[in-house]
Image (cartoon, rainbow, N blue to C red):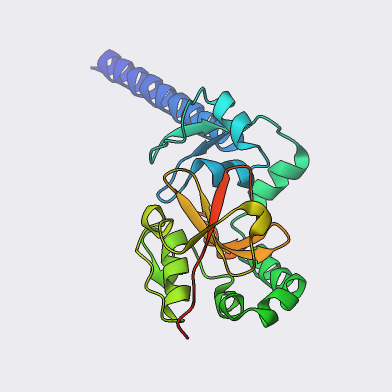
Amino acid sequence: MIEFKSFRSIFLISVLTIGISVITSVNLFAATLTTNTYTVKSGDCLSVIAQEHGESLNNLMKANNKRNHSIFVGQILNISIKSSPSIQQKLQNKGAATTAAKQVELDKISNAAAFSSNSVLAYASNFLGIPYVWGGTSPLGFDCSGFTQYVFSHFGVNLPRVSEDQQNVGTLVSRVNLQPGDLVFFGRPAHHVGIYVGNGKMINAPHTGAVIRIQTLNSDFTYGRRVNLKK
């Protein structure tokens, strides 16, 4: 009986040791993934992921052997193409509320002239800092096309619900002819939409985990559409 109990104790200790080793290995692997990869979330698009991590869309596609822009929720993308301390720090701070609040204030200050001179932008700027919510269509949370639809509805313009349909509204505008208040689209068919602010920038709801903010148009920009306001 004593020998059996000793054997059982040794067996249990061995199992626990193996279990702890496995858990530790999993945690270390997860930590490595967090540092070197990005897991796609609902509402993400490839171009915005590239922009958020300081990469060109082409480089991100090459790093992941992609021939098109299609991604799916849960997909793990390699984002360690240009891993540097500054980019790593940006990733660590991305979700911090204090950082978002400071950025909102900077956006308001640096774009005050555009906001004050354009009615669409003046109204859109009220929502800077509102969190991105997949499928969101209200100030409780917006996705990209929910935000543009909400803003333009304030001026009597009923935009379709999704960016792919919104890109058929209004008059086509090339990059060189963009004016503040124009809709700006990304991809064919469009997978993202924002509102042009001027100086190569847009106000938009980027992706899950982010807030409505001002960003530079990236290389995935396709064209703009100019919509006539009704009030």
Percent coordinates x, y for residue 28 in the rendering: 55, 30
Q: Residue furthest left?
A: 1
Q: Is residue 34 left or right of residue 133?
A: right
- Of residues 51 and 1, which is closer to you in this image? 51
| Rendered view: 47 above or below 7 | below
Identify the residue at image location x=45%, y=82%.
230
| Rendered view: 83 above or below 90 | above
Identify the residue at image location x=44%, y=24%.
17
Residue 139 visible in image: no
Residue 10 visible in image: yes
Percent coordinates x, y for residue 91 in the rendering: 64, 47
Number of numbered discs on residues: 0
Percent coordinates x, y for residue 141 in the rendering: 44, 69
Identify the residue at image location x=51%, y=53%.
185
Q: Residue furthest bottom?
A: 231
Q: Residue furthest front?
A: 171
Identify the residue at image location x=47%, y=29%.
26
- Of residues 225 and 190, which is closer to you in this image? 225
**Quadrant where the image shows the N terminus:** top left
- Of residues 45 and 159, which is closer to you in this image? 159
- Of residues 167 and 173, which is closer to you in this image? 173
Percent coordinates x, y for residue 24 in the rendering: 50, 30
Q: Is residue 161 left or right of residue 184?
A: left
Q: Is residue 103 left or right of residue 137?
A: right
